[in-house]
Image (cartoon, coloured by chain):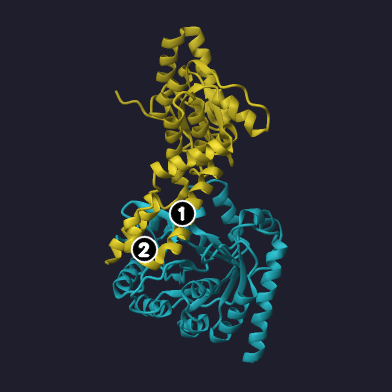
Chain colours: A yellow, B cyan
């Protein structure tokens, strides 16, 4: 047997307990194969338990363990880092709990907080420099740890209650689809639920739209007076949250 | 050849971060799992920088997959190189094993057959890794639970040939020798007498557990007497070497591990007195 055939057989044993592969690896290999299978599954279980603590609190140990087993059968790990193995777990939960969308949303929050924790370092912009900015041409640069997710339930409130050991609220759908921000401020991962107006403004600004053009869009959505006030509030909130790392002024070419 | 470093160290684990940072812990170096710090930024990376400012650091990897039949992962090597450039580690090591094949990653150290085909492949991969990392590596002997037959050579002959062809050094895990010897029925003394002594730059000491049928390299208990005996046997055969206690599960207070390290120091001093 060539080396690559041997490695394929061992992989197939780990992924799906392929008994033909096990037989090809030798009659005496059964006890050792059980050790490797146990180690392989144990690593993945530990990774998901560590990464999805609040999701586990919500589901309970038995249901969480069933979901983990389903995920390990559905998604073999592909990256050199176990951190990457967490990324697909919310999708597995969405399949397992189609009528309980808060489960996948809780998992998304757990996962995004973990990713933000080890994301790139980028110091937040100093609010003191705002006075010199030419806002007609200014664009906002956001922290690279920022992630934006869709939200259909009160999962952030459930997550927050579980995190401090409180009795969580019952899962409830939101009146209209919302969104959630996850980012790291200094060394601490944070999240905040937002509405669709803030979501659209933030995605547009992060996509390179100037602050002035972003204000125009908010004014179009909310009206002149309320729109301008809301844009100002957003800028203040984003600065206070440490979401903005730089404000760039582009020269306007005519 | 990798420059030798004589000293005694511990694996840096989360429950002990504060003690290593707030006090001067009596170790000559610490070892970290490379992959835990091959991240973009955040607190873990800052902790490593702070620890490095106080102690020499060895980088010990578990996912290079030096035995992969389909070669190494270039992105992995680039990340490890960036960490090496920042940390300037004492040693960079990984295992004689494989974890990745055709897009699958096992996250467990899987065994290789000790054949000429495997030797050629491992040497080619080590050559590529050492070129990408800009330095020679240490390769650790694994604990194994399957003995692929027929083999062209013993594990220690495989390691000897690998070192000769690639210029890499050895991280000799004495517990792994004991575990594999017990599981496969070879003499651990013959292994330790036969291994390329002049290539050994670091030693791992750890504990193991009895599984259903085989000894398992669990790193969840103190170093047992059987492993201390093997350490005392091999130490006089080696040149200057860095010794480390590995503990990854059921991690005790730091004082307990420093107590175990004191045993290693005592054995080391005894050997030095005899040598003088």
Is residue A211 toward the left or the right of residue A56 in the image?
Answer: left
Mark 1, secondary structure of its residue: helix
Residue B159 at least partly seen: yes
Residue A114 lies, in percent from the top left, at: 52, 41
The 10 Å Cα crowd at callout 1, few under 14, some 14 to 19, many 20 or more, is many
Residue that appears at 65% across and 91% down: B274
Question: Which quadrant would the N terminus of chain A be assigned to in this image?
Answer: bottom left
Which mark is nearer the camera, 1 or 2? Answer: 1
Q: Name the chain under label 2.
A: B
Residue B88 lies, in percent from the top left, at: 50, 64
The 10 Å Cα crowd at callout 2, few under 14, some 14 to 19, many 20 or more, is some
Q: Relative to the observer, which residue lies in front, B236 or A99?
A: A99
Question: Which quadrant would the C terminus of chain A be assigned to in this image?
Answer: top left
Relative height, residue A145 to residue A214 (above, below): below
The residue identified by callout 2 is B132
Residue A185 at least partly seen: no
Relative height, residue A125 to residue A49 (above, below): above
Q: Which mark is residue A40?
A: 1
Q: Name the chain under label 1.
A: A
Residue A121 lies, in percent from the top left, at: 51, 44
Mark 2, secondary structure of its residue: helix
Q: Relative to the observer, which residue lies in front, A195 or B212?
A: B212
Is residue A28 toward the left or the right of residue B28 in the image?
Answer: left
Q: Relative to the observer, which residue lies in front, B132 or A98?
A: A98
Determine contact: label 1, label 2, CB under 8 Å: no
Q: Would you identify the image quadrant in which residue A240 lies? A: top right
* Mark count: 2
Marks 1 and 2 on same chain: no
Residue A239 lies, in percent from the top left, at: 55, 28
Residue that appears at 58% across and 82% down: B235
């Amino acid at each position: 047997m060539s080396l690559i055939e041997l490695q394929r057989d061992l992989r197939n044993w780990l992924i799906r307990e392929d008994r033909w592969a096990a037989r090809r690896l030798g009659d005496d290999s059964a006890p050792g194969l059980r050790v490797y299978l146990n180690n392989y599954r144990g690593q993945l279980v530990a990774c998901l338990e560590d990464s999805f603590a609040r999701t586990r609190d919500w589901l309970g140990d038995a249901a969480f363990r069933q979901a983990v087993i389903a995920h390990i059968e559905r998604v073999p790990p592909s990256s050199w880092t176990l951190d990457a193995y967490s990324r697909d777990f919310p999708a597995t939960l969405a399949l397992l709990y189609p009528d309980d969308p808060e489960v996948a949303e809780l998992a998304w929050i757990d996962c995004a907080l973990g990713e933000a924790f080890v994301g790139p370092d980028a110091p937040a912009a100093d609010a003191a420099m705002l006075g010199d900015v030419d806002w007609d041409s200014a664009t906002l640069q956001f922290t690279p740890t920022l992630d934006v997710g869709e939200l259909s339930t009160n999962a952030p409130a459930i997550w927050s209650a579980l995190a401090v050991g409180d009795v969580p609220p019952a899962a409830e759908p939101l009146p209209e689809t919302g969104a959630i921000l996850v980012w790291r401020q200094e060394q601490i991962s944070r999240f905040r639920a937002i509405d669709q107006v803030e979501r659209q403004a933030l995605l547009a600004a992060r996509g390179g739209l100037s602050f002035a053009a972003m204000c125009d869009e908010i004014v179009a959505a909310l009206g002149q007076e309320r729109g301008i006030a809301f844009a100002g509030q957003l800028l203040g909130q984003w600065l206070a949250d440490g979401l903005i790392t730089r404000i760039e002024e582009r020269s306007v070419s005519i | 050849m990798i420059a030798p470093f004589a000293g005694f160290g511990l694996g840096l684990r989360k429950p002990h971060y504060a003690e290593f940072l707030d006090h001067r812990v009596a170790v000559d170096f610490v070892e970290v799992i490379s992959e835990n710090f091959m991240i973009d930024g955040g607190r873990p990376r800052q902790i490593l920088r702070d620890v490095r400012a106080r102690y020499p650091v060895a980088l010990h990897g578990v996912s290079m997959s030096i035995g992969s039949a389909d070669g190494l992962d270039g992105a992995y090597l680039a990340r490890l190189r960036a960490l090496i450039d920042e940390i300037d580690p004492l040693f960079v090591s990984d295992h004689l094993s494989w974890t990745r094949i055709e897009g699958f990653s096992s996250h467990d150290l899987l065994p290789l057959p000790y054949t000429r085909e495997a030797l050629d492949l491992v040497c080619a991969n080590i050559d590529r890794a050492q070129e990408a990392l800009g330095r020679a590596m240490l390769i650790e002997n694994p604990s194994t639970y399957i003995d692929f037959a027929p083999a062209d050579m013993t594990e220690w002959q495989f390691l000897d040939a690998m070192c000769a062809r690639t210029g890499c050094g050895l991280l000799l895990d004495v517990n792994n020798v004991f575990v594999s010897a017990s599981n496969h029925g070879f003499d651990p003394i013959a292994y330790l007498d036969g291994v390329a002594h002049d290539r050994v730059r670091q030693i791992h000491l750890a504990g193991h557990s009895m599984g259903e049928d085989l000894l398992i390299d669990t790193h969840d208990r103190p170093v047992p007497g059987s492993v201390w005996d093997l350490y005392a046997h091999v130490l006089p055969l080696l040149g200057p070497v860095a010794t480390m206690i590995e503990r990854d599960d059921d991690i005790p207070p730091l004082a307990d591990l420093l107590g175990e390290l004191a045993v290693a120091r005592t054995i080391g001093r005894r050997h030095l007195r005899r040598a003088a």
